[in-house]
Amino acid sequence: MTSDVRRDGPFYRVTEEEKERFRRDGYVHLAGVLSEDELATIAATYDRFLRREITVPGKDLCDMSGDYTRTFEQFSIVNVMLPRRYHPEWQGNLYEQRAASIVQQLHGEGMVIDYDQLLAKRPFKTDAVFEWHQDQAYWPVLPDSRTATCWLAVDDSTLENGCMRFVPGSQKGPIRPHRPLKSDRGESHTLLTDVDPATDEIRPVPIRRGDITVHDERVIHGSGGNRTAGWRRAYIVAFRAAPTVAEERRLGFTHSHNDEKTVLEDVGFARP
């Protein structure tokens, strides 16, 4: 089935085989979710964030590979949290609509956007490494565990520029112990866990511009540095069950790095 056939306005068809892969491996690669013309519109707004023409205050613009003391020009992984908050015109864009249709097919009704995020690796930044982690380690565990994080490649995502890597099936196990990248979460937001290549299968997933991966928040994943002359831009829209998102907000947990409640213990959850 070609991508043109699978796309229909705001809808993108997910096959039964792909649904099974998502359940089995904790992630799935979906090809051609956006056409080249559709992606060009997304990329133009994305680059306005990178040129800082759209203001992102405080720690919601930060370096996910370093610490909060770096200047923007020193960032290896430019991280923009909640771009739809800071550029409301982006809300309801075609990517969000197609992602919502995909998530509904994977999880059924009642899924809503929890947060969105831009992650851009600068050229020739070998330290632009996203450490091994499980997304669930960053926020509270709540009863409805349905989740789907859609990761759009705005550029070809390759082994050389730091494509996504997964430990397939790891979403079926426990949340592993995580620790801060730096001395504490006030110095850097990033958490990491340990992966053992002797016992954990590590599966790189290079994808083309306009493709996405969709992953469960419990699957272990990360990515390597960028050894190329080009940017590696990714645009994430994460969905969770509506009651879960409502409870997060009640606890004061909004996924903004500017929030006072940035450490899981602050919202009554002991980090594993």
Image (cartoon, rainbow, N blue to C red):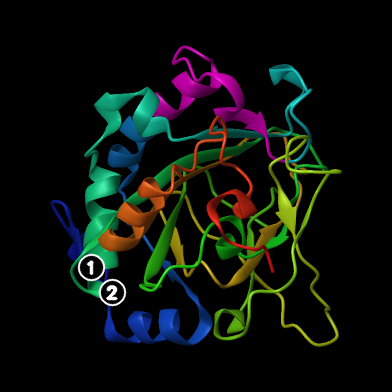
Q: Nearer the viewer, residue 92 or 111?
A: 111
**Residue 160 seen from this side:** no
51 drawn magenta:
yes
Q: Residues within 10 Å of mark 1 (few under 14, many from 20)?
A: some
Q: Residue 107 carries which label?
A: 2
Q: Tell me residue 157's x, y (percent).
A: 58, 52
Q: Residue at x 83, y 79 (%)?
A: 197
Residue 80 placed where, x, y %?
Answer: 53, 32
Q: Quadrant of the rendered structure where residue 62 is?
A: top right
**Would you say 94 lies left or right of 61 here?**
left
What's the magenta region?
Answer: 43-64
Quarter of the image where the N terminus is located: bottom left
Q: Is mark 2 on a helix, strand or loop?
A: helix
Secondary element type, mark 1: helix
Nearest the viewer among 188 and 156 is 188
Give the crowd class for mark 2: few <14, some 14-19, many >=20 residues within 10 Å.
some
Q: Which mark is residue 104?
A: 1
Q: Does the magenta stretch include residue 169?
A: no
Looking at the rendered image, the quarter that the C terminus falls into is: bottom right
Left or right of 108 on screen, residue 241: right
Residue at screen point 39% across, 73% down = 143
Q: Which amino acid does label 1 sit on?
A: Gln
